[in-house]
Amino acid sequence: MSLAATGAMRRFARADILLERLSYTYPGAQTTALSEITLTIAQGEYVALLGHNGSGKSTLARIIGGLTRPTSGRVTVAGLDVAEPTNRAQARQIIGMIFSDPDNQIVATVVEDDVGWGLAARGFAHDVIWQRTRAALTAVGLGGAYGLAPNELSGGQRQRLAIAGVLALEPSVLIADEPTAMLDPRSRVEISALLRQLNREQGLTVIHVTHLLEEAAEAHRVVALDGGRVALDAAPVIAFADLDRLRALRLVIPDTALLAERLRTMGARVANDALTPEALVAALEQNREQAPEQGREQAQ
Ligand SMILES: Nc1ncnc2c1ncn2[C@@H]1O[C@H](COP(=O)(O)OP(=O)(O)OP(=O)(O)O)[C@@H](O)[C@H]1O
Ligand SMILES: [Mg+2]
């Protein structure tokens, strides 16, 4: 059951993110980390934020999350200037963040206490804390983890727990900065699928920072940074059509995309965003089903 299904509605119905000529230079640094970024992310979008090491992804994530103040330019979320220190508490309510290491966000020794901790710190009533905790744990698939200590959970489960802690605050936007970086391949897929599900079922805006193209395949939109600038902003099916462009952005092309490229040159019909082994197999099966018909057409 999703949070929406429990009736726990988001407090901010529309939280579009507007970035206007946003720049950032770290104190004392010679080069700018972000240059003149202008971008709009609508409420409910799932954006994969890609880019090679040092391209500026985390800096941008932190600025949108209100953790870092831009050197120049503006960032508003739901009309709120998140860089304004006086708006900090409200920004934290609207925007949730998770990072690579969930252990940095886990504070309690029992799963349900950890989820409810943020609400308790904000003075919510006990029954609200309990209801939101239950809904958040169910939404992340940890409905069976009550009473466990976080260190009894796997890495993937601890990342789910960190997500639940954020969901309990009912944000409109979730920024996930390389949330799968420390996970095994199976947990990576599961966490990406969970983010997509939360986006679909709850209308949560998701900004998923990753350097893995395969994690971007399901996004509505791929935004790639290069040297602190937006170098690409397109739907995955468009973005992945030009592998040479992605190579030029120093992104690692997954083996599945290389295989798909080979298959296309051999005449198979494989969509550009078929980047997982499952999507490739499905595309090949479809080709096989269509092949006999094409053979018949040619024979006629
Ligand atoms: N605390 C800091 N002080 C000075 N420069 C920094 C600091 N953090 C990052 N930078 C620089 O800012 C630029 C952008 O870094 P950022 O961490 O945002 O990139 P990223 O795309 O998240 O990289 P990664 O893929 O390695 O996580 C890089 O040139 C980096 O060296
Ligand atoms: Mg980073």
Image: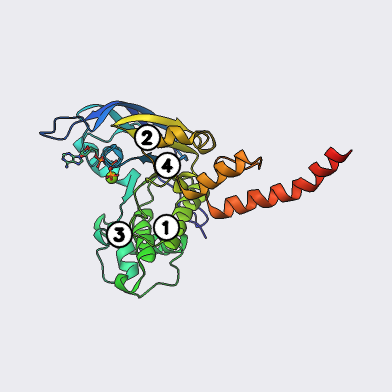
The mark lying in front, picked from 4 and 2, is 2
**Pointer 2 residue:** 249
Q: Describe residue 64's horizontal placement relative to residue 186 as left or right.
A: left
Q: Amino acid at mark 2?
A: Leu
Instruction: Work out whether mark 1 precedes mark 3 in sequence or the reverse, and give the earlier one.
Output: 3
Q: Classify mark 2: residues with Cα within 10 Å, few (<14), some (14-19) or many (20+).
A: some
Q: Is residue 135 visible?
A: no
Q: Nearer the viewer, residue 115 or 234?
A: 234
**Pointer 4 residue:** 48
Residue 188: image tag? 1
The alpha-carbon separation of the residues under discs 1 and 4 comes to: 15 Å
The mark lying in front, picked from 3 and 2, is 2
Ligand 2 within 8 Å of disc 3? The answer is: no
**Pointer 3 residue:** 102
Q: Work out which residue is located at the far left of the displayed protein and give it.
A: 28
Instruction: Work out whether mark 2 precedes mark 1 in sequence or the reverse, and give the earlier one.
Output: 1
For the C terminus, give its image quadrant: top right
